[in-house]
């Protein structure tokens, strides 16, 4: 015992020096990811298409508007309830194109393989990617393969890029949310993240949770019939619903108010989150979208979503407001309000 | 969901709040001990439902927040050794040590892993016989049984590459210290429901008798907390001081005896330093001498680490309920979850993080 408790001797730790290394949290889709983007990538590559910071770039070529996007997939385990890395890599890129309102057309697929990976595993992943591409109506037209030494990657990593055509009159971007707009969500949140976590950690819950991984472009096409009233689409993948809403609020310079009661959440996912001390608002989705729409068209767009198999449980979950720009608030079940913040890094399971 | 929805019901919550308002005739300061309860209060805005004059003061019951800097520095030192695999609960990784944190050590190649249970760390040690697996065993009476079980299992199976870096704290001595402090202004306590699930509440009956202070063992959902507040306010207004148990669906008077037995077999009560508060006699647990082979301090010959904590952060006062996080000049400016000055800004259960995540809009507006 080096000191007795004394109210006058209270003290606190030093701030951390600037880290200087990449942390896992830099890949979480939260504030640390945004910091990398702002400090490293944007200053290096700045141009108007990139500067929009949407899930896809939209560029004009000879009068046609092309959507172009890329995404890398490093999921562990490779196979999980509701999907696998192969289908995920296809759907992920299809969805990034779809969020720009584009009809997805062509994909590239690049594999980074770890020495020693069973060929049978690769075959399963490739066949799954093939089926996913067929289902989504896209063609995989180019690819690449690299092999790294054992230990230098985790089984296999995949990168996919994709291009699609944006129809005339469709202009979706995260900077277009306006006060009064409604916030729509296509279905229950958190299923992908919990399915992966349960499989990875060997957790067992009542009622299995499967990933919601799915291609959203046909759902988007159904919504585009109301296109002029559609301001912005985003799929709330890593970082969850919270990060997506925070990004849109920041890019549009508006506030948001979400209704906790209105946000669809399956009991199994809620139970798993309660047990693990996770907030489902931050858990990843792979088959959901958030839409910002004009208030007057909200009901029509909601109905068009609900008539599609991937939007049956769609709901209006909140409104865009002009106070508190960049801040997302939540009206709780008790009728009080709180902030829904963007996390710094990954959600950390609590001790007790 | 059963046992959850009824405890988050708006009608019940508002009815309880209305009854509290009806009973209150003058200001009262109540402390919730547990960080989990602080988290619920902030997340659901429970203090917004309370009448003016009923103040909730946030207690020292965040295990991450009160783990001494020395322990963090030792964990960081161990994790930096090439032969060591350091295993921890998730929210310890971002707690700042004197110079770095476990995330940074991991980024530099240290083998740091997160588990949900210390028994997973024991399994890991069996699976990695060439590694020295160290579990960072921290927490209150809640985590003590599982941590004890890990040491017990390791000893039963003569596991040689497993040890625990122990920094365990006990709640009742901390309440006693708060009540004895001349600065104390807390008039009643919500006792931590999970700790009492393990330990029962006879120790809290002693505190009630000794200090004539009302204590209610409370749960963690909004309705639990409001009901506990109502029970405390009713006692205070009547001039009574009793131990009451609001969390009857989980807590019994004797508690979980097999769990207590396991703790008793493996740990003994010791003096313990609390981060930000100082040393409190008899407020910790350490491994008994017969478990010395599993004590990382002894196995690795860790010497006392000299630490120095600078003055700007007021977490010590926050942990004692003397200040609110928003009283701190560094709050949300120089101290944020991305760059925490103190542990209460790191853990989800830390009062500063709870204010930061859920309540910043009140300050801005």
Image: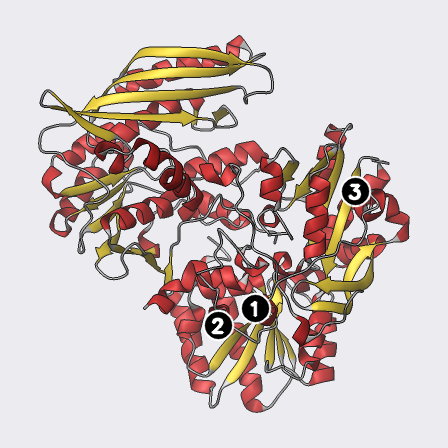
- Compute the Cα span from label 2 to label 1: 9 Å
The residues bearing labels 3 and 2 have C-alpha atoms spaced at a distance of: 40 Å
What secondary structure is found at the residue carrying circle 3? strand
User: What is the x, y in percent for residue A32?
Assistant: 44, 43
Residue under the point 31% across and 46% down? A247
- The subunit letter for the residue under badge 2 reads B
Q: In the drawing, what numbered circle is on residue B61? A: none
Q: Name above or below for residue A161 compared with residue A262.
A: above
Numbered badge on residue B327: 2
| Figure label count | 3
In the picture, the disc for residue B314 is 1
| Kind of element beneath mark 1 | loop
Earlier-in-chain disc, 2 versus 1:
1
Mark 1 and mark 3 on one chain: yes
Which marked residue is nearer to the observer: mark 1 or mark 3?
A: 1
Instruction: Tell whether label 1 touches label 2 (CB within 8 Å).
Output: yes
| Residue B107 visible to the viewer | yes
* Mark 1 Cα shell of 10 Å, populated few (<14), some (14-19), many (≥20): many
Quarter the N terminus of chain A occupies? bottom right
Label 3: chain letter: B
* Residue A135, horizontal then vertical, whole percent: 29, 19
Asked if labels 3 and 1 touch by Cβ distance under 8 angstroms, the answer is no
Q: Residues within 10 Å of mark 3 (few under 14, many from 20)?
A: many
Q: Which numbered disc flags the more N-terminal residue, 1 or 3? A: 3
Q: Residue at horizontal 47%, vertical 28%?
A: A81
Classify B243 as above or below A273. below
Q: Which residue is mark 3?
A: B163
Sequence order check: which comes first, mark 3 or mark 2? 3
Which circle, 3 or 2, is nearer the viewer?
A: 2
């Amino acid at each position: 015992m080096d000191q007795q408790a004394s109210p006058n001797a209270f003290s606190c730790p030093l701030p951390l020096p600037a880290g200087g290394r990449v942390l896992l949290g830099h890949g979480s889709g939260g504030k640390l990811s945004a910091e990398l983007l702002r400090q490293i990538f944007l200053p290096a590559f700045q141009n108007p298409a990139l500067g929009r910071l949407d899930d896809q770039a939209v560029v004009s070529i000879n009068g046609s508007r092309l959507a172009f996007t890329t995404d890398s997939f490093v999921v562990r385990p490779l196979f999980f309830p509701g999907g696998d890395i192969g289908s995920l890599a296809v759907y992920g890129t299809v969805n990034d194109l779809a969020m720009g309102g584009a009809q997805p057309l062509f994909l590239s697929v690049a594999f980074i393989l770890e020495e020693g990976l069973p060929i049978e595993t690769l075959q399963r992943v490739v066949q799954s990617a093939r089926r996913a591409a067929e289902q989504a109506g896209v063609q995989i037209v180019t690819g690449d393969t690299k092999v790294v030494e054992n230990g230098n990657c985790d089984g296999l990593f995949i990168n996919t890029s994709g291009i699609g055509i944006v129809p005339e009159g469709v202009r979706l971007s995260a900077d277009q949310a306006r006060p009064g707009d409604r916030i729509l969500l296509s279905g229950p949140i958190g299923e992908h993240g919990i399915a992966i976590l349960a499989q990875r950690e060997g957790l067992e819950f009542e009622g299995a949770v499967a990933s919601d991984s799915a291609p959203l472009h046909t759902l988007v096409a159904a919504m585009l019939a109301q296109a002029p009233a559609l301001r912005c689409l985003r799929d709330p993948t890593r970082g969850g619903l919270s990060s997506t809403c925070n990004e849109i609020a920041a890019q549009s310079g508006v506030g948001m108010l979400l209704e906790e009661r209105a946000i669809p959440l399956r009991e199994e996912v809620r139970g798993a989150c309660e047990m693990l001390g996770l907030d489902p608002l931050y858990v990843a989705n792979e088959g959901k979208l958030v839409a910002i729409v004009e208030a007057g068209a909200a009901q029509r767009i909601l109905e068009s979503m609900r008539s599609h198999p991937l939007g049956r449980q769609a709901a209006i979950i909140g409104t865009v407001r002009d106070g508190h720009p960049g801040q997302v608030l939540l009206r709780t079940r008790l009728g009080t309000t709180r902030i829904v913040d963007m996390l710094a890094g990954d959600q950390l399971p609590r001790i007790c | 969901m059963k046992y959850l929805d009824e405890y988050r019901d708006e009608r019940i919550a508002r009815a309880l709040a209305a009854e509290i308002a009806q009973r209150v005739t003058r200001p009262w300061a109540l402390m919730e001990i547990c960080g989990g309860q602080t988290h619920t209060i902030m997340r659901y805005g429970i203090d917004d439902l309370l009448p003016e004059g009923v103040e909730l003061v946030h207690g020292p019951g965040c295990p991450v927040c009160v783990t001494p800097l020395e322990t963090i520095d030792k964990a960081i030192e161990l994790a930096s050794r090439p032969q060591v695999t350091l295993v921890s609960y998730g929210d310890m990784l971002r707690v700042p040590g004197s110079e770095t944190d476990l995330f940074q050590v991991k980024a530099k190649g240290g083998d740091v892993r997160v588990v949900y249970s210390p028994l997973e760390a024991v399994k890991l040690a069996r699976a990695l016989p060439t590694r020295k697996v160290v579990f960072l065993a921290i927490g209150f009476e809640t985590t003590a049984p599982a941590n004890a079980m890990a040491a017990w299992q390791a000893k039963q199976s003569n596991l040689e590459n497993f040890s625990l870096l122990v920094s365990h704290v006990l709640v009742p001595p901390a309440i006693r210290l708060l009540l004895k402090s001349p600065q104390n202004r807390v008039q009643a306590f919500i006792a931590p429901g999970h700790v009492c699930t393990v330990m029962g509440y006879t120790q809290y009956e002693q505190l009630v008798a000794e200090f004539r202070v009302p204590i209610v063992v409370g749960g963690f959902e909004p309705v639990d907390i409001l009901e506990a507040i109502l029970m405390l306010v009713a006692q205070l207004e009547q001039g009574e001081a009793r131990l009451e148990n609001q969390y009857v669906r989980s807590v019994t008077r004797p508690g979980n005896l097999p769990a207590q037995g396991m703790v008793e077999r493996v740990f003994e009560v010791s003096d313990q330093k609390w981060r930000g508060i100082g040393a409190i006699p008899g407020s910790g647990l350490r491994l008994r001498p017969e478990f010395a082979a599993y004590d990382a301090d002894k196995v690795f010959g860790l010497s006392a680490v000299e630490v120095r904590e600078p003055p700007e952060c007021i977490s010590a006062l926050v942990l004692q309920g003397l200040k609110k996080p928003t009283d701190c000049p560094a709050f949300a400016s120089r101290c944020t979850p991305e760059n925490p000055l103190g542990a209460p800004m790191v853990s989800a259960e830390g009062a500063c993080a709870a204010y930061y995540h859920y309540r910043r809009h009140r300050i801005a507006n």
